[in-house]
Amino acid sequence: MERRQFIQIPGPTNIPDRILRSLSQPIINHRGPEFEALVKDCIKGLKEVYRTNNDILIFPSSGSGVLESAIVNLFSPGETIVAVSQGLFSERMAAIAENYGLNVIRISKEWGQAVKLEDIREVLEKDINREIKGVCLPQNETTSALTNDIEGVSKVIKELGHPAALIVDAVSSLACLPFETDSWNIDVVVSASQKGFMLPPGMGMVAVSNKAWGLIENSKMPRWYWDYKAVKEKMKENQLPYTPATTLLFGLKESLKMISEEGIENVWARHEIMGTAVRNAIKAMGLTLFAEEGYESNTVTAILMPENVKYKDLAELLRLKYGVVIGGGLSKLQGKIFRIGHLGSISNMDTYAVMGAVEMSLYELGYDVELGTAAKAVAETLLK
Ligand SMILES: *Cc1c(COP(=O)(O)O)cnc(C)c1O
């Protein structure tokens, strides 16, 4: 029997049928009026999701490309930035900056630990000469399934009157977790198509504040493809300087329509419920969450592998028997944790089914759990 797959990795995420259908339209001229109307619609919708009046630029790119774009546009070689390093994605940002000749002050945390506001305060207070030009961190570190307090970090920078720009990787959290680009004063917000936006991979977006445009004016970093000024100039005509991911824009228009119909606040609330249901089921089964308590993400959950169960066996059984695809630990967490993505297109019944499948698979692999435990925990969360 053919059945749907549950792609419960933390991106790419499941694509709703409405979006899949929108992707099957014939291609259009990216220098024509239909395309211009499409871009105009998408930017309007993106501003509602980002909660911003800042400029939003789009790139045919993976999320990492857009992270790189922020570094090459805002800074010059030899300048200093602060980067939180607490997992693969946050460390990637630090590495990109170093590769471009920036001096990177790392705030290094154990993987699984969130950055604390004191950590940020301490580094910025020491910077008496105001040499730090930017602070970079992810809202959601997908590797370890935790969420940093972005609003808090922004407040610390403001309280200290520090001029550093705040650059946030919101790839695995935008359109899922509460995010307020304008009222939190975030200068650069990076996202990508394949997570909260429920689209295939291949497109990145970035919101750029006026303060960031000031840095861009002074930046001496060489660039062409990523040049925000050139992209902004062309986007005034609702076009891009080069061939865009037109088909993904068809999908984005539909995705933004779906988000708008549900209401962004309801989207946030749904993710909170799904995250809570998954964690409650995990805890009820006697398993241990990996992320620091109080900072667990509502888009992805990381769980320590129980003793005597191998990640490969669990992932294979879930995939072959139940059509549920989960993620493993990355880099130094390989084999130590498993990760369940619950972002984008995910409903109550998806969560119920996925956690049931996780329970049955663990049971079959010899883990000591009473059948029905996960389902009960999910049901109790949903009925609350
Ligand atoms: C997925 C992800 C990215 C981008 O990954 P790409 O594979 O380059 O699209 C960046 N940051 C975070 C936090 C992510 O979860």
Image (spheres, rainbow, N blue to C red):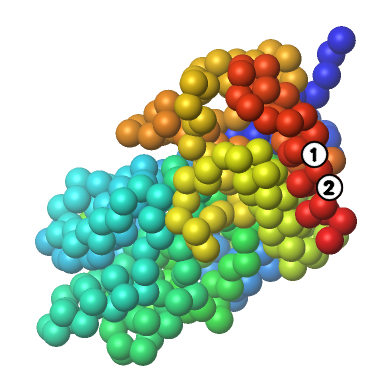
Q: Give coordinates of residue 344: x percent, y percent.
A: 69, 47
Viewer-proximal residue, 59 or 104?
104
Tags 2 and 1 in contact by the CB under 8 Å rule? yes
Q: Give coordinates of residue 342: x percent, y percent.
A: 66, 44
Gap in angstroms between the C-alphas marked 2 and 1: 6 Å
Q: Give coordinates of residue 311: x percent, y percent.
A: 51, 23
The residue pinned by badge 1 equals: 375
Q: Residue at x 80, y 34 (%)?
A: 372
Residue 119 seen in the figure:
yes
Residue 213 seen in the figure:
no
**Which image quarter holds the C terminus?**
bottom right
Q: Along the horizontal axis of the image, is 327 left or right of 83?
A: right
Viewer-proximal residue, 102 or 147?
147
- Give the amino acid type for the residue marked by disc 2 in the picture: Ala
Q: Eyeballing the image, is 268 above or below 285?
A: below
Q: Residue at x 67, y 22 (%)?
A: 363
Assign a secondary structure to mark 2.
helix
Q: Residue at x 32, y 45 (%)?
A: 92
Q: Along the horizontal axis of the image, is 105 left or right of 182?
A: left
Q: Along the horizontal axis of the image, is 74 left or right of 104?
A: right
CB at mark 1 closer than 8 A to ligand 1? no
Neighbourhood count class around disc 2 (C-alpha, 10 Å): few under 14, some 14–19, many 20 upward: some
Q: Along the horizontal axis of the image, is 199 left or right of 338?
A: right
The residue pinned by badge 2 equals: 379
